[in-house]
Amino acid sequence: MIQELKDHATLADDFNKDEDRVGWHDDTLWWIREKRDKIAWQVPDWELLRDAASNIKDHVLSNLNPYLLQFEANAIANGITVHWAADAAGHNQIVLNILREKEINKLVKSKSMLTEECHLNDFLADNGVDVIDSDLGERIVQLAEEPPSHIVLPCIHKKKEEIGALFHKHLGTPEGNSDPQLLTEAARHHLRETFLSRKATVTGINFAVAETGEFVICTNEGNADMGAHLADVHIACMGIEKIIPERKDLGVFLRLLARSATGQPITTYSSHFKKPRENQEMHIILVDNGRTKQLGREDFRNSLKCIRCGACMNTCPVYRRSGGHSYHYAITGPIGAILAPNLDMEKYSDLPFASTLCGSCTNVCPVKIDIHQQLYKWRQVIVQNGYAPKAKELSMKMMAFTLSSPFVYHTAGKMGRAVLKYAPFTVNNSFNPWYKQRDMPEVPSASFGEWYKKNRN
Amino acid sequence: MSSRAQILAAVLANQPTILPMPAFQPFSPTGENSFDKFVATAKGIGSSVYFLSGIAQVKQLIYTNFSAGRIISPIEELSDVAEFDFADLDAHTLEDVELGVFKAHFGVAENSALWVTEDLLGKRVSPFICQHLMLLVNKTDILQNMHQAYDRIGAANYDFGTFIAGPSKTADIEQSLVLGAHGPRSLAVVILD
């Protein structure tokens, strides 16, 4: 994939070529952010809830080993088979092995960011397994052969006309029709057939309760339930950080999740799976894939508290204007930018720089992750490890040299003003990245230092 | 070393000194009448709400709104208007069900979610696969918030349970809300006196 080689700034440039689309994308996400505010403010104790959620998650991360063992023991006692996968490859292999043992080569899958992170679909396709994503947004990006651009709203970057064209080609809807009602109805029929005919399903997990061994999946569409309750084999995949101690803790998280995500009071379905149905096989795959490493990074451990609501994306001024694909990672936006470098610091070294550090993400995070501070800290780690982009490294060295000597500083100031005054064309061109979306400032006749010397009396 | 042993060892090595589980704050009540809040929230997310005072009226509601099509309900008093013995059928055979009628344990005012468990559903898939859904709840079983809900659930031993709030829906196409994604196209909440 060519896209993998481009960095955030380049991909954001591509997205910004269509100004109208950027404006539309920006407005849509901000509207969701406003819905979140409106509903959050209706809840007395909203801040207490955020505190509680954050503290519960802190506690879980500090006691994760015993909680994982407790969850495993209870899930097994409930009749569920528990698997452990150290990395993405291990996870994908476990899924394939379960399917092969049952001689199943067709799968219906509900939304799971973990399986996106592990590139499960590609792996299964390479091994002859046909996967159909059942979340409408995910089905749309799957038909478009694109990754999701948002963890909650996978096709938020797509206009309905583009979706209409996709459905016309793949599902036979009338050409030129892009009515959301009609398109959703077409997907309903197409996916109902899928649910009824597939013998295995893969789902994600929102919360796994150590006390009872049950797990909870939240959807609005009902697709996870349709898949799970009709399939002979249900494989549920989770990162090891999804554990919560007790059933009653769900009260805190379910109050926060949908309100933060889409401004709804709760998702349509919050399904609690405790035991398989009669004659059904239920599997849980517990996945590490870098999480234990992040657990050991004191500055970044907090990122494991994430409940994948997407609020940080909806509010982010950079995400809203650069689009989810500019992050070139399964988890987009600010939270993705602090999770991705843990997996591959070099490949994702650009992401912590894709932020203004305004802190809006931190303010809306329902589990109080200090996202913007972690972005700032990642920048330092990335530079120290030698992964900073070359241009940035050079300009930072120049800056350090200039600021460390009064003589150089004053001379550089004079030169800068002279250049802007007499030769603006040398900076007002496309070689200067600052000039791209901005005008250069008007030139003052003197520096503040010079002005002060003259006027101090 | 197995993946399991490897992961558990890495977790143990990397988890920080234990932080205490927070003591639960007594979350304040909303100050609103739970019942009114429940009704307003249910309507706000696309459910229709009926106030009825007995099974006879429920039957009347079913007759009025669903004159044709397959109706299922594990509620014995409804066995003259709905198919009662469907729990032993293959789940897939429910795909042509027009209406499913079930009892809910309780409702939650802050989000209008209704709690149902497998023993009330006949089959797990039944409230998802039907085209339309009707859930019955007693007026006295409306709780204020999710904390009260989990207090009420307590250590109940269900195999599967779900909160249902409204008809199935999606807004994946340009954020236009469409009711009836994969599950029921409508939810009728019947509040019984």
Image (tube, coloured by chain):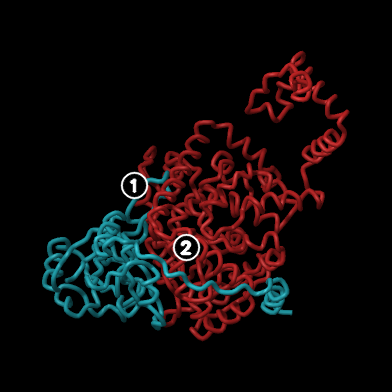
Q: What amino acid type is highlighted by mark number 1?
A: Leu
Q: Residues within 10 Å of mark 2 (few under 14, many from 20)?
A: many
Q: Residue at x 70, y 55 (%)?
A: A341
Query: Picture coordinates of residue B37 (x, y %)?
Result: 28, 60
Q: Is residue B152 left or right of residue A298?
A: left
Q: Residues within 10 Å of mark 1 (few under 14, many from 20)?
A: some
Q: Decide if residue A425 is in sight here.
A: no
Q: Is residue A407 above or below residue A65?
A: above
Residue position marked by numbered label 1 in the rendering: A182
Q: Residue at x 66, y 27 (%)?
A: A436
What chain letter is assigned to the residue under label 2? A
Report the front residue among A37 and A409.
Answer: A409
Residue position marked by numbered label 2 in the rendering: A49
Query: Picture coordinates of residue A441 (x, y %)?
Result: 67, 22
Of mark 2 and mark 1, the one earlier in the sequence is: 2
What chain letter is assigned to the residue under label 1? A
Q: Is residue B145 left or right of residue B59?
A: right
Q: Colour of chain B?
A: cyan
Report the front residue among A236 and A51.
Answer: A51
Most extreme residue toward the front is: A457
Q: Is residue A297 left or right of residue A69?
A: right
Q: What amino acid type is highlighted by mark number 2?
A: Leu
Nearer the observer, disc 2 or disc 1?
Answer: 2
Q: Residue at x 56, y 67 (%)?
A: A55
